[in-house]
Image (tube, coloured by chain):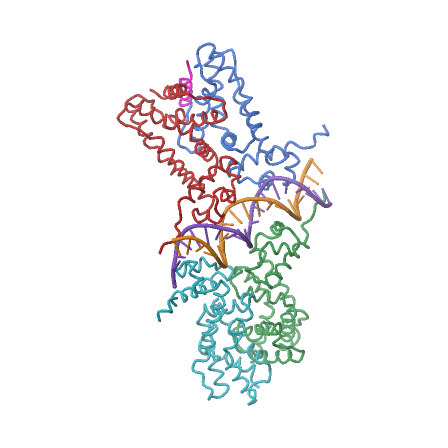
Chain colours: A red, B blue, C cyan, D green, E orange, F purple
Amino acid sequence: MAIRQKCDKKRKALLDATLTLVNNNGFHAAPMSKIAKMAAVSPATIYIYFENKQDLINQLYLEIKAAFSAYAFKNYNEEESIKDSFRQVWMNIADFKLNQIPESNFLSQIDNAPIIDEESRLKGLKHLQPLLDLWERGQQKGVIKLVSPYLLYAYTIYPLAFLSNMKQKELLILSENNLEDAFEAAWNSIKA
Amino acid sequence: MAIRQKCDKKRKALLDATLTLVNNNGFHAAPMSKIAKMAAVSPATIYIYFENKQDLINQLYLEIKAAFSAYAFKNYNEEESIKDSFRQVWMNIADFKLNQIPESNFLSQIDNAPIIDEESRLKGLKHLQPLLDLWERGQQKGVIKLVSPYLLYAYTIYPLAFLSNMKQKELLILSENNLEDAFEAAWNSIKA
Amino acid sequence: MAIRQKCDKKRKALLDATLTLVNNNGFHAAPMSKIAKMAAVSPATIYIYFENKQDLINQLYLEIKAAFSAYAFKNYNEEESIKDSFRQVWMNIADFKLNQIPESNFLSQIDNAPIIDEESRLKGLKHLQPLLDLWERGQQKGVIKLVSPYLLYAYTIYPLAFLSNMKQKELLILSENNLEDAFEAAWNSIKA
Amino acid sequence: MAIRQKCDKKRKALLDATLTLVNNNGFHAAPMSKIAKMAAVSPATIYIYFENKQDLINQLYLEIKAAFSAYAFKNYNEEESIKDSFRQVWMNIADFKLNQIPESNFLSQIDNAPIIDEESRLKGLKHLQPLLDLWERGQQKGVIKLVSPYLLYAYTIYPLAFLSNMKQKELLILSENNLEDAFEAAWNSIKA
DNA sequence: CATGAATGAGAATTCATTCAT
DNA sequence: AATGAATGAATTCTCATTCAT
């Protein structure tokens, strides 16, 4: 017998609403009632799709992390040189950070606050493995410094969050050329 | 003297308690009642020293930012070379980020969430002016790239927050040598 | 036959689930959703068999009361002496109270709380008429005290609920002999 | 410095309101909001005096149990004969059950539902020790049957709850004489 | 200045019931 | 007949803030 199906539209609407509210008001000011209203469902409906508020946040976090990673490895080609491969990934991430503003800000907010449990945080990290592999190959070939991948990340990827932030505040303009310069700066800090 | 009755001890205790609670539980789980309890005063007392919760957070933010800046320019000597001057500031900031964990984390949390009003945020930024001046001199002398100071910050100072984070999670060990390497990497990314 | 589509199995399963949940958690913690889950049907299905929660409880109450009464008059023979007739009924009820624990507890819970409407309560009482008749005959014959049947009930039948309770808590052991003694005590309190 | 004191009046008003509501509507229909309203305080105030709803119920239960026990041993004199001592206690309890209707009904409701934790239940039982002692003396002197005190309770005290119930429903009238008869019936069921 | 009590507004979550299929 | 999704109203409890002393 046909039954009204738990439709993904509502789940999506709820995640979207949460993203918007958490970004605008902060996690502490994104009550379930507002999320429901913005998603145009009853508060009770949230609990059909998510166990509780924490679960809602966790799932949103994981989905955005997954989207981020997918984005990062678009057109990624292991056959190219280490630097070119890395440029591709770096540019992808820059593109995400600078243009997917809500997602980008959400990740920053969550990553810097004790909001999410360590389990979800770890899950979210897994996706970046191909980048770590690339760096390792670069180190074996002697083109990348022999330092912890966390240092490589700190100097190449992490700064993009700050740039995104400054761009949003209109303190910084990033053209194509600027971006290429920025990449070169990043590369300079880790090349062997 | 008789007028300054509001004893600073209590104010300090309240700021300390807030710092601890916000760092452990997140801003969203640091209620005034707990702050009061941890500072061993009545909830009502908080409102003698601070207008409201927002004001408490703002003041804490500003005090920590001020402490951070003071720290940054310890032993700062404009007479030295650009690189050496910068090394001094960079090392100071690294020291702060890696060792003043609660303060460091608090700043990260606040800087990445829409918790604080733009006014306080701007006030907090002012203190770094000497560094901006240093960079400008470096650029005039041709030893630092002619790019936005935000880019310089993104590639040299901002990564320290990530390194601090990783160190806390024991994913990274930073010895004196490592730090010198890290500084060189930072310098490489901005030197002309 | 084709008309009786509403299968009695589901109705039974629902009543059973309700009995179990109300006994374990109390009426206040036996939500329709749990009842449905335990009966392995949809919440919506409950409303095919019962008007609403109150009706479900009422019907359960009445069914158990009916079962109780049927039990009470098993092997009941009006031809025997008043005392022997009464012994049979008393022993039956004791058997029910001491061994049909869920049903017994459910009746106690409902009978002592303002959960059920007076109408259902009255319906539930009707079934004991033969016992009242027996007592009246006993009174006419001068073997039972001339007091209100409620007093007779209070001293002979009602105590069994307490004994059942104590037995469940393992504060009391009731062997065959004990039971015979208990009956004699009951009888002593009402015999003329 | 003088401070507004946690006044017992409010605590009392809350317990009273709870008693009334639980008796009228049942535990399941006595929401904190109504309790607060009836006690003329804010819902939040309840949580100054009680940890949570369970604690409120527990404390109410214990206070009523204590009142019940105090009542039971009014004018109790161990010097009298076993039967006379017992009559005094029995009459006190009858008086309580028949006249302190709300308290009496509350105890019945709680005692027959899985509302309260075993710990509170046990605490509530302690107070009846003097009665158990009396019975034991009676048994040693050979005037009371050598059976479990639970049986003695079941046949003498427990029936009073039923009589109270019937009296409330106006199915039974209990005059002074009736009560004396009722006591004799109780005594007959346990005397050696 | 300092306080513990008090609070109205609002938080997350649950519930009995209905809807749409 | 049967269902899983959906829901508005209600529930317990918390919070930032104020009151009265």
Q: Any magenta on residue B185?
A: yes
Question: Which residue occupies the extreme top position in the image?
Answer: B141
Residue range in magenta is B177-192
Where residue B68 sits: x, y (%)? 53, 25
Residue B90 placement, left or right of D38: left
Residue D54 placement, left or right of A108: right
Name above or below for residue A56 compared with residue A134. Answer: below
Where residue A112 sits: x, y (%)? 47, 33
Front residue of this view, candidates D74 and A71: A71
Q: Residue at x 70, y 30 (%)?
A: B4
Front residue of this view, candidates A61 and C77: A61
Q: Any magenta on residue D94?
A: no
Q: Residue at x 50, y 80 (%)?
A: C183
Res B66 seen here = no
Residue B192 placement, left or right of A143: right
Main secondary structure type of the part rendered in magenta: helix
Name above or below for residue C50 compared with residue D35. Answer: below
Name above or below for residue C174 compared with residue D59. Answer: below
Res C1 seen here = yes
Where residue A144 sits: x, y (%)? 33, 22
